[in-house]
Amino acid sequence: MNRNKPFGLRGRQWYKIKVSGSMASDIILESTNLTKEFKGFVAVDGVDLAVRRGTIHALIGPNGAGKTTCFNLLTKFLSPTLGRIIYNGRDITAMKPAAIARLGLVRSFQISAVFPHLSVLENVRIALQRKRGESYDFWRSERMLSRYNAEALDLVEAVGLGQFANNLAVELPYGRKRALEIATTLALDPEMMLLDEPMAGMTQEDIERISALIRRVAENRTILMVEHNLSVVATLCHWITVLARGRVLAEGDYETVSKDPQVIEAYIGTGDA
């Protein structure tokens, strides 16, 4: 299937086409009654979430909505108090982050290995070593390690860092460091990527660059992202789940959820835009 086509359609028009076809029941990640309680405070309260294969799905909400906690539950950095998480038909509720990464569910910007005093190319090469089950053998001969160079360079080029391949990671501007983190995540060959506020702290130029990169990455992957920048969500995401007070408040395309009176009240009431 050519996944470039959906990017020419927006919102509900795209989703109706998607769910009416053969992929209508193709859910790659779902949660049922997902709940997290901290000493009597319920941060996530019975969240049912379904992410369809091949989509860019956003998890948004005002401050204190529980989206970060929900994201940490889905990526197994927290264990739920109640509920189940299913990935590709497999129950991953009790699994660890490293184990689900091996299944193809990878959280970018958290699990990515970026070493500031190694070059861009070396960082991606290390991630490729990890994917193949090898240790980080810094002491091995350059000839042995260089067998990863061609594949690593392909990934570096794919995220727009070709001219920076020999630069130290610490020398990169913030937005390009994020691109490097995506490259190291792609080296793990994920089927689904989970992005935790990928645009946080970026300039408009960086936002545009990383948005374009996420579109390219999503051509043959599923993406779930937590994002505060609603203009990014509006232009990038096919489907949106809005959380408030730990519960699902609304779902749909951006046009639908942005006009929902409950969503408007939730955002205005907390001072978020």
Image: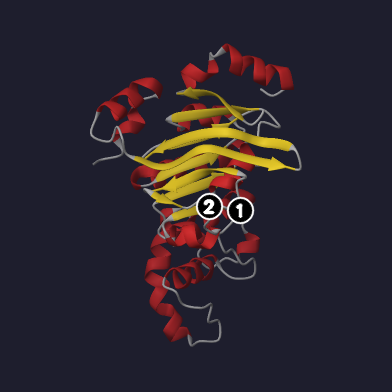
* Residue found at x 49% / y 24%: 251
Quarter where residue 36 is shown: top right
Q: Is residue 149 left or right of residue 67?
A: left
Residue 51 picture location, percent across and down: 42, 37
Q: Earlier in the sequence, mark 1 or mark 2?
A: 1
Nearer the observer, 170 or 29 = 29
Q: Is residue 199 visible?
A: no
Disc 1, disc 2: CB below 8 Å? yes
Mark identifier at residue 107:
2
Q: Residue at x 46, y 49 (%)?
A: 193
Three-letter amino acid code at disc 1? Phe
Q: CA distance from mark 1 to mark 2?
A: 10 Å
Give the x, y percent position of residue 45.
62, 33
From the top left corner, tell me how far across and down residue 93 is, in percent: 51, 51
Of 224 and 178, which appears nearest the observer? 224
What SS does tag 1 mark?
A: loop
Number of numbered markers: 2
- Give neighbour class at mark 2: few <14, some 14-19, many 20+ (Cα, 10 Å): many
Q: Which mark is residue 77?
A: 1
At 62% from the left and 36% from the top, the residue drawn is 67
Residue mark closest to the camera, 1 vs 2: 1
Instruction: Indicate the amino acid at tag 2.
Output: Arg
Residue sitting at 51 percent across and 78 percent down? Answer: 135
Q: Pick the residue in front: 53 or 38.
A: 38
Q: Closer to the camera, 250 or 119?
A: 250
Q: Check the picture and name the quadrant holding the N terminus.
A: top left
Which corner quadrant of the image does residue 171 belong to?
Answer: bottom right
Q: Is residue 2 visible?
A: yes
